[in-house]
């Protein structure tokens, strides 16, 4: 085991999530900016994400964090921080992934509240083509600095929704009302993850807003490694072949820790020990039926082909890992992320899907003195941690569109005989130009 895996998160370098030239990472280090001490409002504190410069050089917050109470949140909360990265080789840039705000607009001031220190809330004003994903708190009346936060290029984010109330200043005595709200992302497109950065939005009213200019989630593609599929088997003779052909890992989806529920690790432990998980799909040909026609006439053969997939087995896999193979997850109440595997990986377009019958009939006509074998492709899904240990659950699926028939002896293709053309002497070219 790598001893670094047991180190506090603040002392460990973690590989970033990459989207185009945007790098995304996580920090559990914060600096308290302001709290409600001296106010009659519910207790709360504003914190500035402060990524360690030796471990996360060049990383910036997307906004401040608002937490109920006055307890220290260091090493207890985690939020996203971002950095400018390099473009993959051969790709064309749409511009820098990050830009500093051009200015700040004051959203709220606690003037009149009687707290021990003054507070003001500010919205970063992004450059054209960029968006702000959060607000900043100032322990005074001065604007924050442009170096305190970064705005993100618009094609790397997606508009999001307003969720629950985090805090409001009721009872503070401030002349202006203020309420802060959480954000939740829209349903992800196939092959993508949408995730909120851990910031908040704020308005000068106690009513829940319908939309907000800083309500955005980060978009992340799910990296997918694709390898060649297994080679379809052919009958070498009349003997019955084995039930299973060799298996081959054909697709691997790399998933960030926060979209996985690991039964052995709490979220902070996941981030420290397995920031990435690998969902492998292994494909192999499985024998459906074997038949030998020893008669002098064609003969029909039928077999019952099993289907190991079911909604029940998928529900078990989801309860253990949180992953939904053929849809977005999590389902139900608003969450901090929405994820969906690509259609090709999850086999959502294949015959019958995950809710089909447990068995289907396969039938074929076998010519006289022929032996036939019928195969289908079975896929096995398994989830691996970064150290290659397996999360204890597997899921199986047989694609009804993958039926493969092979017979022995194989039919001989008719030999194509090309008639020979006698060679003739080429005419001698003559000059016909005037």
Image: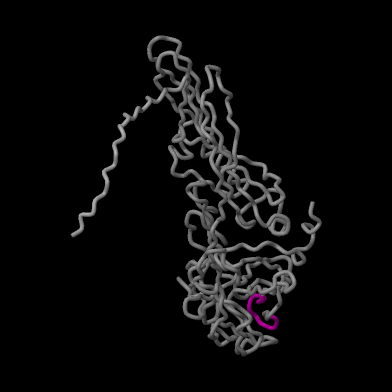
Q: Give the image location of residue 219, x and y in percent.
A: 53, 63
Q: Give the image location of residue 394, x and y in percent.
A: 61, 40
Answer with left or right where residue 39 lies relative to residue 189. right
| Depth check, front residue: 195 or 292 | 292
Assess whether residue 46 is covered by the magenta stretch.
yes
Query: In the rendered view, would you say 83 is above or below 114?
Result: above
Q: Give the image location of residue 214, x and y in percent.
A: 51, 74
Q: Name the residue at the right extreme.
A: 3
| Depth check, front residue: 378 or 87 | 87
Answer with left or right where residue 418 lies relative to residue 343. left
Q: Please report the bounds of the magenta region as a residue range.
A: 37-48
Q: Give the residue drawn at x 55%, y 17%.
A: 239
Q: Name the residue at the left extreme.
A: 434
| Depth check, front residue: 206 or 254 | 254
Q: Give the image location of residue 109, x and y in percent.
A: 58, 86
Q: Give the residue drawn at x 72%, y 74%.
A: 53
The image quadrant that residue 114 belongs to is bottom right
- Whether residue 173 can be seen here: no
What colour scheme governs how the chains and residues are painted in the rendered image of this protein? one colour
């Amino acid at each position: 085991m790598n001893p670094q895996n047991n180190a506090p998160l603040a002392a460990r370098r973690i590989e970033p999530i990459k989207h185009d030239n945007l790098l995304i990472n996580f920090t559990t280090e914060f600096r308290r900016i302001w709290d409600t001490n001296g106010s009659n409002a519910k207790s709360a504190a504003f914190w500035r994400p402060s990524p360690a410069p030796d471990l996360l050089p060049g990383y910036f917050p997307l906004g401040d964090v608002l937490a109920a109470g006055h307890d220290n949140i260091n090493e207890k909360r985690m939020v996203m921080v971002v950095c400018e990265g390099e473009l993959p080789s051969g790709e064309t840039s749409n511009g820098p992934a990050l830009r500093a705000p051009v200015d700040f607009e004051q959203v709220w001031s606690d003037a009149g509240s009687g707290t021990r220190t003054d507070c003001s809330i500010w919205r970063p004003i992004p450059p054209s083509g960029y968006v702000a994903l959060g607000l900043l708190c100032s322990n005074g009346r001065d604007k924050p600095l442009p170096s305190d936060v970064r705005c993100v290029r618009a094609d790397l984010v997606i508009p999001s929704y307003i969720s629950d109330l985090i805090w409001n200043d009721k009872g503070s005595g401030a002349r202006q009302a203020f309420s802060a709200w959480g954000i939740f992302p829209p349903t992800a497109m196939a092959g993508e993850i949408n995730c909120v950065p851990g910031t908040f939005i704020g308005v000068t009213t106690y009513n829940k807003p319908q939309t907000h200019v800083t309500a955005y989630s980060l978009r992340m593609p799910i990296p997918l490694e694709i390898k060649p599929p297994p080679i379809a088997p052919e009958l070498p003779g009349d003997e019955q072949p084995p039930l299973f052909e060799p298996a081959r890992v054909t697709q691997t989806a790399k998933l960030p820790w926060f979209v996985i529920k690991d039964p052995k690790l709490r979220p902070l432990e996941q981030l420290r020990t397995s920031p990435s998980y690998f969902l492998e799909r292994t494909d192999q040909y499985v024998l459906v039926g074997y038949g030998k026609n020893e008669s002098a006439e064609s003969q029909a053969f039928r077999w019952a082909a099993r289907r190991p997939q079911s909604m029940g087995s998928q529900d078990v896999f989801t309860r253990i890992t949180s992953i939904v193979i053929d849809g977005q997850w999590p389902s139900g109440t608003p969450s901090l992320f929405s994820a969906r595997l690509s259609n090709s990986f999850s086999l959502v377009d294949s015959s019958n899907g995950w809710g089909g019958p447990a068995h289907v009939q396969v039938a074929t006509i076998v010519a006289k003195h022929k032996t036939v074998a019928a195969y289908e492709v079975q896929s096995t899904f398994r989830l691996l941690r970064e150290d290659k240990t397996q999360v204890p659950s597997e899921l199986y699926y047989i694609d009804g569109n993958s039926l493969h028939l092979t017979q022995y002896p194989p039919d001989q293709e008719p030999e194509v005989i090309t008639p020979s053309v006698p060679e003739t002497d080429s005419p001698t070219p003559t000059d016909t130009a005037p």
